[in-house]
Image (tube, rainbow, N blue to C red):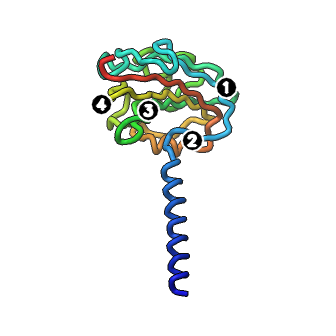
Amino acid sequence: MGMRKTIIIVGVCLLVITAAAVTAWSWRPHRQPVLNLQHLMKIQSPAFAAGSAIPSEHTCDGEDVSPPLFIDDLPEGTESLVLVVDDPDAPMGTWVHWTVWNISPEVGEVAEGEVPAEGIEGITSFGRAGYGGPCPPSGEHRYFFRLYALDTLLDLAGSADIGELEAAMEGHVLDSAETMGVYSRGQ
């Protein structure tokens, strides 16, 4: 009876540990804060086609300025936009290159090297506000430019990081869009 009880306890513990590991592994911060969106909104850059190389002028190997972006087809009721640029291939986990919120929904274009109209820049993985371009330590990395349409303005200071931004966005996302470019040093 004692051995059977021990086996059952060990089995339950293994089940709990496995469930916790699967949950932790599958949780991806700032990848998909909302589900079941229509995804009609668009974001693209005239500097690079989706899935192609980001020009070096937008990286640490060049002028390190943000690329121009076109935004289109916002959902009805959009009060503000959020832009998040990140690198999920970074060795220490997802590296946040740029966060901007409270962008005016009237913005159809973001000029190269400019902060979108009315936008507030947050703290990135570089430990400062503002755009920090691709600068992978080795190999080719993917850089996602994600745009979120919100039904509200966010009450966040410029000292907010990605965690605070995601928490503030929760329950307010109407739609999202993304484009992705790649970069490796010496391109």
Residue indicated by mark 4: 137
Single out the residue that lies furthest toward the bottom. Answer: 1
Residue indicated by mark 3: 86
Residue indicated by mark 1: 40
- Mark found first going from the N terminus, 2 or 4: 2
Q: Amino acid at mark 3?
A: Asp
Q: Amino acid at mark 4?
A: Pro
Which residue occupies the foreground of this view, 141 or 159?
Answer: 141
Q: Residues within 10 Å of mark 4 (few under 14, many from 20)?
A: few
Q: Amino acid at mark 2?
A: Pro
Residue indicated by mark 2: 33
Provide residue 31's location: percent of width, then percent of height.
52, 38
Residue at point 53%, 16% (across, down): 109
- Mark found first going from the N terminus, 3 or 2: 2
Mark 2 lies on a secondary structure that is loop
Which tag is nearer the camera, tag 2 or tag 4? 4
Provide residue 127's location: percent of width, then percent of height.
32, 37
